[in-house]
Amino acid sequence: MSRFLTVVLWSSLLLTGCRQDDWSPSVPAAAGDAAVFRLRGGAYDGAATRVEDLRMDYDRVEFRVVDAASGDAIGDLRGLYHPDGSELRIEGLREGDYRLLVLGIRGDWSRDGVEVHPISHIDEEWVSFPADPGEPLAAEYFYSQSPFTVRTDISSEGIVTSQVTGTETLQQRIIGRADFTFAYENPYIRTALVSLRATLGGARFHTGMTGAGEFTGESGELSLETDLEEASTYCFLSLAGGTSLRGEIELVTRTYRGGEVRRTFAYELADLEPNRIERIHTPVVHPDNTSGTMFITPQAYAEGSHGEILQDGEPKTVYTDPAQRRFNTAAPLQLSVTDAGELHARFYSPRPLSRVLVRARIPRVDSEYLDLAWFDSIPPFADFCERLPQLERPTQCLSESGRWVDLPQLTAADFEGVEFAVECEDPYWKKLRQIIHGWTIAFSLFNGDPDRPDGGPSGNWMGIRPVHCREAVAFFLNFTYMIDMPEHEVILRENQDRLYGNGGVNDKVTPERVLSQMRQSRSLNVGLVYPGNGIVGLGGGSSYGVYQQAWLQHYFDTYSCEIMFHELGHVMGYNHSSSFTYGPWAQELMNHFYVNHLDQMPIDSPSYLNSSQNPTLY
């Protein structure tokens, strides 16, 4: 349904809103006593683009028609504004030469206290604003004064027709816009803002406009403090009395070392003309301008649009490619510098990591580790990649001994042989650092097809999906953490008489041998077992897999956990005659220890992944 605004002009102006469904397409000339005017407008002078608006879709329209010669207002006219077509239709016009005055408003004019007055002559004040400019304008105001002519003709048959010339109406703003802009030598300063405020003062503005478009009146002096993070663009009527808009900008930022920097900049804007954008531009002089440490705040991370690994929808050719998706549980945070000079951080973890300092020793630059990047947070399964500042400009970095090191502008080749160190006080990181004997985990389809609804079973395997891969990350982080827990070692020693090998109960295995086998460096291809053949787990050599339920329930279900450890027993070289499969190690000691000590492990809850609610499960 179309939307219309009806304006009725008698001795004063009345604006109402209505809806009408029988609007017919307009034509350049009016039929009978109706004239249709097309409202057009353009961008601000000084805007980045000069493309003109094809339509002026206003929230409110006021108009007056005056006699072209005398300037006297014409009464008894009816106007209908069509916002969707940016057209104003006026009825009641007679033959003559006129001027059409149009005020268009876009935005919430009620906040501005604007008043539109009935006028009898073009030189009278038509529009007025409050004398106290308590805040910038909430709406934009457009004005035009357009000459047009109405001529009537009587045909030989006595039919009266009207022609209107001058129906294209170009609107321009009667307000000016002040934009606060900033130039940051170091982009991480902008994304580390704590606050950005400005005082607006000194200026007085015009408070009114006549029908002829002449400004009138003068306001009191503006005095206002504003938050530039919430809004950096402000609209006003033009400056009056030779005054200027002036004040101070206060910028407060965090530093990655935990402090704050407060900077103040003075500004003055001497001109603010109608339909123009004036920029209050501030080059930010800041002590961190030369810093070469990437300061990755949540805002900086979000703006980087960084990826995530092992996510639903990731192609199987990616997550089952060891060159792209493989990790060691003792090093779940993978760090590198790419050939393009980007810091690449990939995190195999269901949990985030907070307050992470990445240091790098760059042999071609310095013998010490330097502060290369600070992350307020690294998200779960993060795949962060961002160009290093050192490739853009000369920088300074703080060394591990506390001295500042000046670095010239570097190339990617200068990072050859880089070594990384991580500092982090997050308790979760401390647990991850306690994984000493890591296992290397990759993911395999084993000829299954995850793109098929049934997983494309191939023998006892089906296509593993990312939801299962994420659970594999959780389980093997916990398992390799568990094998170095003192409590785990105690339970093995207390039950050493129940540990036996492939020769049965008389083939005793010492706790030291078991610990050595569990702590041995291993590489596994992890998959998803197809339970249709009655098989719920497979393991041996470098292959490992369990059925879907076990991947989901290993946290709390001792039966599912038994399956996990049964297959680990096979990976360690044990058969079904040993206690490591159908025996106490898998069926009683390990599965119960894992479930009962889950609260001490790195991934201490299934809620991080919430896999049981995942829509991609089989």
Image: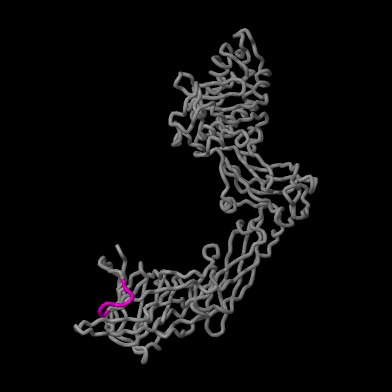
598 shown above or below 60: above
Residue 76: x and y in percent read 27, 83
Camera-nearest residue between 564 and 458: 458
Q: Is residue 17 left or right of residue 618?
A: left
Query: Quadrant where the C terminus lies?
Result: top left
Question: Which residue is most to the front?
Answer: 156
Residue 159: give x, y in percent of width and height: 21, 82
Q: Is residue 395 above or below residue 499?
A: below
Whether residue 558 is visible here, answered yes or no, is no
Which residues are the magenta region? 26-33
Q: Tell me, yes or no, whether the highlighted magenta stretch contains residue 241.
A: no
Q: Which quadrant does the N terminus fall into?
A: bottom left
Relative depth, front residue between 209 and 143: 143
Residue 599 at what x, y percent from top left?
A: 55, 32
Residue 139 appears in the rendering: yes
**Quadrant of res 590:** top right
